[in-house]
Amino acid sequence: MCGRYALTLTEELKEILGLLELEDFPARYNIAPTQPILVVASGEAQEPGSNLPDRRAVLVRWGFTPSWVKDPKVFPLLINARAETAIGKASFRAAMRHRRVLVPASGFYEWHRPSKKSGERPQAYWIRPRGGGVVAFAGLMETWSSADGSEVDTGAILTTAANASIASIHDRMPVVIKPEDFARWLDCRTQEPRDVVGLMQPTDEDFFEAIPIADKVNKVANMGADLQTPLVIDKPPKAPGKEAGDGQLSLF
């Protein structure tokens, strides 16, 4: 899953993601469900020959609400969408076809939760690109409209099976879209869901590094850079097996 993440390298976003505009956006070290998150969507098409970016930054609530939901208060909070089923699932089908977005991040947090029988303690990890910088998760966006006409933009992060380097911590991870695939993922005009299935795969095994950290990240009120301070642990977690827990930090 992806139940917490961070976005701190905001000065790089405009250039890396090809945004037309980006207002000042503060560093955030503990982004949690229901909070506003920054996503990148396709913008208006530029004139032929223009060098201007055709992408825009949008703030959405992290917690996807399909347009057909009548009362979001009684609808489950969908912070993640499984890449394997999103194309056919009623909640995400329309967004997969018309409203694919990128979710920029500096990395994400995850818990390794072993079984009680193992005697191991839960351990939090800060998982970031080995080379640093900004990574783009695959996301979906939907605008929910109430009966009185008010609208709320909502979003979810797509997840896939964890690669070998993350599987010892959790069996799921965010779908990472590579820079060379940004345009293809965001192009909902010519690229149908079946055309981008190949992008929703686990990223390379050496792409992320997992850094053990204190469990302060599990409290939303903790928002400082110290959340990412490394801890020294005696041994790495065991690979998940029949007795392994689900490792969820929140809802990934």
Image (cartoon, rainbow, N blue to C red):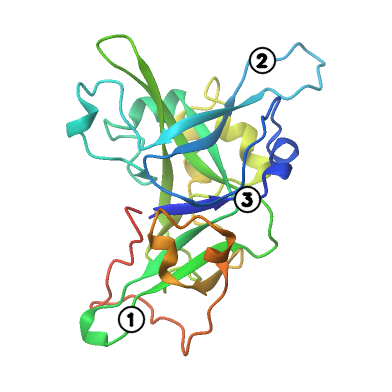
Residue 152 % position (x, y): 38, 23
Q: Quadrant of the C terminus?
A: bottom left
Q: For residue 203, which numbered disc appears in the image?
A: none
Looking at the image, which is closer to me, 150 or 127? 150
Label 1 – label 3 distance at C-alpha = 29 Å
Q: Is residue 186 above or below residue 247?
A: above
Q: For residue 8, which numbered disc appears in the image?
A: 3
Disc number lying in front (2 or 3):
3
Looking at the image, which is closer to me, 49 or 237? 237
Q: Earlier in the sequence, mark 2 or mark 3?
A: 3
Q: Which residue is mark 2?
A: 45
Q: Which residue is mark 1?
A: 121
Q: Earlier in the sequence, mark 2 or mark 1?
A: 2
| 134 with respect to 244 (left or right) | right
| 191 with respect to 83 (left or right) | right
Label 2 – label 3 distance at C-alpha = 29 Å
Label 2 – label 1 distance at C-alpha = 52 Å
Q: Crowdedness of circle 1 by 10 Å Cα count: few (<14), some, many (20+)?
A: few
| 198 with respect to 89 (left or right) | right
Looking at the image, which is closer to me, 77 or 24? 24
Helix or strand or loop: what does disc 1 sit on?
Answer: loop
* Residue pictured at 22% horizontal, 81% vertical: 116
Helix or strand or loop: what does disc 3 sit on?
Answer: loop
Disc number lying in front (2 or 1):
1
Residue 158 % position (x, y): 43, 44
Helix or strand or loop: what does disc 2 sit on?
Answer: loop
Residue that extends furthest to the bottom in the rendered view of this protein: 234
